[in-house]
């Protein structure tokens, strides 16, 4: 059956169509947060088949397949790549109204020019057609990025990373700028002491000196911030349940760190205090370096311990959490703002019930020094779909300024995920077009076109200034 992805997909009125095709469609992509593997990019990896580039590491698809009763052998297990693809193809018709249905057919069309629906009948032909294209140099890792008009992207990297792959990429003859992002979550995660101690040893190796106390830990992290900065890094990222502010003179971060190095149990209140102190230190360092700091908040991770033990983290067993966000976030940012050390900040919300909290929180700390200094970030993870994007855009519009928004990102491990930028752009244009159609906005095409162009590209280009 022929695909439903037409030129005017999601564009439900003539105004939306004019805005998308005239102002958004051809803009380059700045993907400022993703989880692509730098080694694949540095080696310009050639994928043997579509399963490798499309299904490996994609826990969105894995969750859907498990829900449909597919055995794990065909998801993360030992089945052949062709069998895994066929199992996914069998599942696709049953994903209707899930964003996977839209993403799947948009990706097949944009990368491989495949204009038929994926199902059990078409799977063999689609598998063969995609694999033929993937064998060509134009469909290598970097070729796929070129195909989608990617101008720059930022990977997500641990402070201990040598950035060797980024060195290679910086020397490559490419017009795509690929930069690292500093993600120090493991440096303040005391929930598993043995893992924490192992991480400190790894950090010692990276910075070249012994970490024997809290001060040397700070020096090590500053060392890595400097190293990342020298290698083009201009962003940090943090994945937390929530931000907290802890006032408790009974705790001492140095003593907590020494206890952790000694392998002693750290109480939850001590863990929270240690995270607060170390995160505050890092945020001041980001400000000093002119970085943008990102906070991804609200995920309840690794809820299925049997499957965690079997498959490890990031395999599809996380969910939206219902953590209290407002007070801790406000006090944490105010703590940094009190010494004028709050860097440019993006806060991403995972619980749609908290959208208004995040949108208004951003407004509290915009001080007139920088356009859109604190951003209510794009719809994230489980909210990265039509309804979630519309709700984020509407809340931002109602409680902040949509015109200052830095727009979309993929947050993906897949090189085939970049049509999500197109998906977002279509949704944005349709939202504005519907307002014009309903008499809520004037049809000033030049001005609304500029607004759309800014949100899709220029705001991010100016904000990050890579």
Image: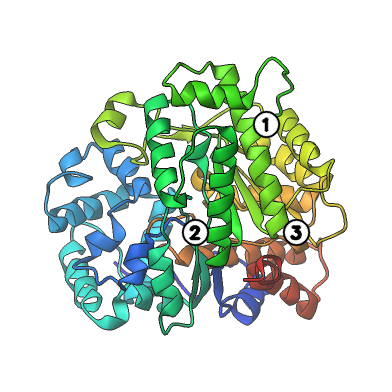
Say whether residue 440 is left or right of residue 383: right
Which comes before the other along the chain, label 1 or label 3? 1
Closest to the camera, between mark 3 and mark 2, is 2
In this rendering, would 444 be left or right of 132?
Answer: right
Circle 1: element type = loop
Question: x, y percentage for residue 232?
Answer: 55, 67
**Is residue 267 at least partly visible in the picture?**
yes
> What SS does tag 3 mark?
helix
**Which residue sits furthest right?**
368
Q: Position of residue 280 (x, y in %)?
A: 68, 39
Circle 3 is placed at which residue position?
A: 402
* Quadrant of the rendered image containing residue 278: top right
Q: Which residue is mark 1?
A: 325
How many marks overall?
A: 3
As drawn, 242 above or below 142: above
Q: Which residue is mark 2?
A: 410
Mark 1 → mark 3, Cα distance in angstroms: 22 Å
């Amino acid at each position: 059956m022929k695909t439903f992805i037409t030129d005017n997909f999601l564009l439900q009125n003539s105004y939306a169509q004019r805005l998308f095709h005239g102002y958004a469609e051809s803009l380059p992509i700045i993907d400022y947060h993703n989880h692509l593997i730098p080694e694949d990019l540095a080696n310009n990896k050639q994928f043997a088949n579509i399963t490798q580039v499309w299904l490996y590491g994609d826990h969105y698809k894995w969750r859907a397949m498990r829900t449909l009763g597919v055995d794990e052998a065909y998801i993360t297990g030992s089945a052949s790549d062709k069998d895994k693809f066929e199992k996914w193809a069998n599942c696709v018709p049953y994903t209707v109204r899930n964003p996977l249905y839209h993403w799947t057919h948009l990706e097949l069309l944009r990368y491989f020019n495949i204009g038929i629906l994926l199902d059990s009948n078409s799977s063999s032909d689609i598998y063969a057609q995609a694999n033929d294209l993937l064998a060509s140099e134009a469909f290598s890792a970097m070729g796929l990025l070129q195909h989608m008009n990617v101008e720059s992207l930022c990977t997500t990297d641990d402070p201990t990373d040598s950035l060797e792959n980024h060195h290679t990429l910086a020397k490559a003859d490419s017009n795509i700028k690929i930069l690292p992002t500093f993600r120090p979550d493991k440096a303040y995660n005391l929930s598993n002491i043995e893992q924490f101690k192992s991480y400190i040893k790894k950090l010692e190796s990276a910075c070249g000196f012994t970490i024997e106390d809290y001060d040397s830990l700070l020096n090590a992290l500053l060392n890595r911030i400097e190293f990342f900065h020298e290698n083009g890094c201009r962003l940090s990222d943090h994945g937390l349940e929530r931000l907290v502010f802890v006032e408790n003179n009974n705790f001492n971060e140095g003593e907590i760190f020494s206890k952790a190095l000694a392998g002693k149990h750290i109480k939850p209140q001590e863990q929270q205090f240690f995270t607060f102190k170390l995160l505050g230190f890092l945020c001041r360092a980001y400000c000093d370096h002119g970085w943008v700091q990102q906070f991804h908040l609200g995920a309840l991770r690794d809820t299925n311990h049997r499957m965690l033990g079997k498959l490890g983290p990031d395999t599809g067993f996380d969910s939206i959490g219902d953590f209290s966000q407002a007070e801790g976030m406000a006090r944490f940012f105010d703590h940094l703002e009190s010494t004028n050390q709050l860097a440019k900040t993006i806060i991403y919300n995972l619980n749609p019930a908290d959208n208004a909290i995040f949108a208004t929180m951003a407004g509290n700390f915009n001080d007139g020094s920088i356009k859109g200094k604190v951003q209510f970030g794009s719809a994230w993870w489980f909210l990265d779909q039509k309804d979630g994007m519309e709700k984020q855009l509407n809340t931002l519009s109602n409680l902040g300024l949509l015109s200052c928004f830095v727009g979309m990102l993929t947050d993906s491990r897949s090189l085939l995920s970049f049509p999500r930028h197109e998906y977002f752009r279509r949704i944005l244009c349709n939202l504005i077009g519907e307002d014009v159609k309903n008499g809520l906005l004037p049809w000033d095409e030049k001005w609304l076109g500029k607004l759309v162009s800014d949100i899709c590209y220029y705001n991010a280009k100016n904000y990050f200034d890579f």
